Image: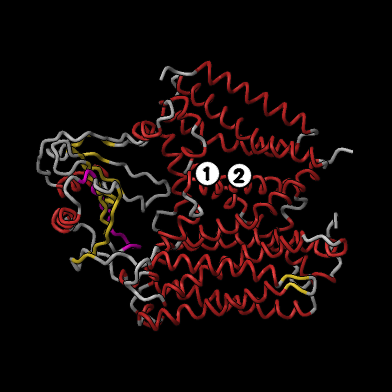
Amino acid sequence: MKPTLRQSMDFLHTWTGVLFGALLFLIFFMGTLAVFDREIDRWMMPETRFAAPPAGFSVEERVLPWLRGLAPPGSTFWFVLYPDARTPTVELGWNDPASGKRESRRLNVAGARLLAEAGSWGGTGFFYPFHYSLHIRWKSLGIWIVGLAAMAMLVALVSGVIVHRKLFADFFTFRPQGSRQRATLDVHNVSSVLLLPFHFLITLSGLIIMFTIYMPAGIHLLYGGDTEKYFDEAYSQVRRAPAGQPASLASVDAMVREARHRWGDGEVRSLWIDNPGDRAAVVGMGRAPRDRVAYVTHTLYFDGASGAVLEEDKASHAMIAQNFFTGLHLVAFEHWWLRWLYFVMGLASCVMIATGMLLWVDKRARRHRKVGLAGWRVVDAAGCAGSLGVMVATLAMLIANRLIPEGIAHRPQLEAACFFVAWIACGLHAWLRTTAAGRRAWGEQCAAIAALALAAPLLNWLTTGDHLLKTVSADHWAVAGTDLVLLTSGFAAALAAHRLYRSARTAVVLTEPALSRRG
Amino acid sequence: MLKFEVASRMSAAVLGGYLLAYAFAAGTASALAAGGLLARSDAVVAASMLSFLVYLVAAIYAFAARTAWRAWAWIAGNTVLFGIGAVLFRPAV
């Protein structure tokens, strides 16, 4: 007999979930951290805990002299990333023609001093790239794996909705006092259904941001595969070859004034100079998209030598649509309530994914054990290491960040190594502590999370002197907020560990009758 | 479901679905550009954004179709249709 639509969708939902569950949790968890990546930067880079300079400082007097000193002669590209409410530092970048590499340093404009090279990759350098590339750079493989997982997520969402019988009733169904499996099912359904638009749009927009990588069909056909050419047209980019004749730069401050005049309001976010010192120099600048959802920068290009406007990027409707999805995903706008909402919704996605994997195990543990299958143990251990283990690893990295001495060689790499070592340890632990006698791994890793999350703010206090009373009273919410989230997570994990220890003693999952239709 | 049946539907969803989405993006982009409806870069971005939804529909259909054979036929047929469109409207680069 042919399976019904609901049965085939149930099959599809179950297996995409099991195959991609751990990977999706990792991607969503890192994405959730990335919502506050720059606040995590402040926590992990204490040397950047100062107030942002007031807007409107002279880039010509207070920034460009530093670049002239830092960039080697022959450098063809200078870059300035402006500070804003979330980042107090100015980032200076340039290319080094000798090594072919891009270099960068951070500047404290108000204090007129260059910061030492960062001893940490922080939230923007480690957690955020982890989210979209898994740190697998070879042939962009990580980006492709994330893309495949995103498609699996969309498939799981759609098939999950089709499987569902009572979409509306589940809004109001939570039975925490019933069996644990029923409570897990309720949490899975509530977190899925309530936030379905978020789950769907955050995943789809992630794919749309990267469409030139994932779906280069149009570029292949209409641009002969020349992605640069496509970008030039789509963003009205101006690029010029160096003329080979030296020329001094016209007033960059005047160009900034002109840009602000044309934009009507708003501040510069990024500014770059192609061929500095050359007669064919081009100065480009993009507007900070902090007051709108769409990530539209209205980039302006100036002739470096004369200061005349060369080109203005007037985003087309199609580009604004793409920029809207980009902005919806990247949360570049400044709105603290919405930022927290994204954080909470991201956590809800994590809960949905983790409870989905738990359901799979709960439905099968008993039967698998009876017929001697190891499947439940593999998925349960992977689910534990893939969810709680990732949190343990993240916290281990934060702890390492506070304990590894400053100035030591390869400090960022050491921090990252702590992440991966802790994660591997969690994988081994999860496998060894998940046996027919009980599922102890979950409770024990919860306990580890509790210990680490409570220790991290303490270490922050001991190593930097910034305790909560001080950071809250000084309105330093990046550090205070990170500490508060850590403390809250620590207490929640302690509570969860306590409950899991109790249930592990009775090995609930293996004695409870299975609820599933399939068993 | 039988193992072969599952493997066949899975490859129809993952590979067939991507090829269909790719053909859709190429065909739609070139048709939009050739028809003068949109600028070249806009045609590319509009078609590419929609192609992810096409991929999603194809992947779901690969498992929703009554038989794996039917899933393959539908996905392959549409891929060829959009492929023909891409070739027909293809501009000189």
For the N terminus of chain B, the image quarter is: top right
Q: Which residue is rendered at x = 87% and y = 64% of the image?
A: A370
Dividing the picture into quarters, in which one does residue A324 lie? top left
Q: Amino acid at mark 1?
A: Leu
Across and down, in percent, residue A289 comes to 36, 50
Q: Give SS at disc 2.
A: helix
Dot 1 or dot 2: first in sequence order is: 2
Tell me if mark 2 has few (under 14), some (14-19) or many (20+) residues whose alpha carbon lies within 10 angstroms of its own: many
Cα distance, mark 1 to mark 2?
A: 8 Å
Dividing the picture into quarters, in which one does residue B66 lie? top right
Q: Amino acid at mark 2?
A: Met
Instruction: Tell me the number on the disc at residue A207.
Output: 1
Query: Which chain letter goes with mark 2?
Result: A
Dividing the picture into quarters, in which one does residue A360 lie? bottom right
On screen, residue A444 versus residue A296, left or right, reads: right
| Same chain for the residues under marks 1 and 2 in the image | yes
Q: Which residue is denoted by mark 2 in the rendering?
A: A151
The reply to whether residue A266 is visible in this rendering is no
Q: Which residue is rendered at x = 37% and y = 78% of the image?
A: A471
Q: Give SS at disc 1.
A: helix
State the extent of the magenta-drawn residues as a range: A75-87
On screen, residue A33 versus residue B74, left or right, reads: left
